[in-house]
Every structure is written in C-alpha cells, then in structure tokens.
Image (cartoon, rainbow, N blue to C red):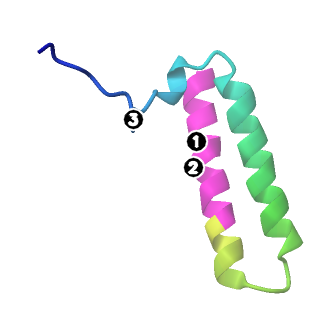
C-alpha cells in the first residue's frame, strides 16, 4: 500500500493569493461598515468589528511597505 496524503483542512497562506491586498481592503471596509451600522445597538459587537478592522489595517500596512 502507498502513502496517501489528505488535503482536508489544509490551509493556504493568505500571502499566496495574488489579490491579497484587494481582499484585505474589502474585509477592512466590510468590518468598518458593520461597526458603523451597529452604532446604537451592541457596543461589544462594534468593538469586535473595529478590532478586526484594525488587525487587517496593520496587515495591509506591513504588506505595502
């Protein structure tokens, strides 16, 4: 019997994608929109979306350098 390798659960690094900057910019805008749409409802959820957006912004800044 030969060894078989399963690709289920395999993770591709985000840097491998050619359009990674566009994807991250989209995600950043999406999280900021979600945070602004929830302005008067749930403060913890707003904080969560803003933190996600900040992390993506840091990634973008590091990639552009």
- The location of residue 15, given as percent across then percent down, is 52, 23
- The location of residue 35, given as percent across then percent down, is 78, 67
**CB atoms of marks 3 and 2 within 8 Å:** no
49 above or below 26? Answer: below
- Give the CA separation, mark 1 to mark 2: 5 Å
Judging by the rendered image, the residue that carries numbered circle 2 is: 55
The answer to whether 59 appears left or right of 5 in the picture is right
Q: Which one is nearer the viewer's eye here, 35 or 9?
A: 9
Residue at x-position 56% and y-position 37%: 59
Q: Is residue 59 magenta?
A: yes
Where the C terminus falls, by quadrant? Answer: top right
Where the N terminus falls, by quadrant? Answer: top left
> Circle 1: is it few (<14), some (14-19), or many (20+) Cα within 10 Å?
few
Hey, which quadrant is residue 31 in on the image? bottom right
**Closer to viewer: mark 3 or mark 2:** 3
- The location of residue 40, given as percent across then percent down, is 85, 85
| Label at residue 4 | none
**CB atoms of marks 1 and 2 within 8 Å:** yes
35 above or below 31? Answer: below
| Label at residue 58 | 1
| Label at residue 8 | 3
Q: Residue furthest left?
A: 1
Q: Main secondary structure of the magenta part?
A: helix
The answer to whether 36 appears left or right of 8 in the picture is right
26 above or below 33? Answer: above
1 above or below 62? Answer: above
Q: Which residues are magenta?
A: 49-65
Secondary structure of the residue carrying numbered label 3: loop
Secondary structure of the residue carrying numbered label 1: helix
């Amino acid at each position: 019997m030969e060894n078989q390798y399963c690709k289920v659960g395999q993770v591709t690094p985000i840097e491998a994608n050619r359009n990674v900057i566009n994807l991250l910019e989209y995600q950043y805008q999406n999280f900021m929109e979600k945070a602004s749409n929830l302005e008067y409802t749930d403060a913890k959820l707003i904080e969560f979306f803003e933190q996600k957006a900040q992390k993506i912004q840091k990634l973008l800044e590091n990639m552009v350098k």
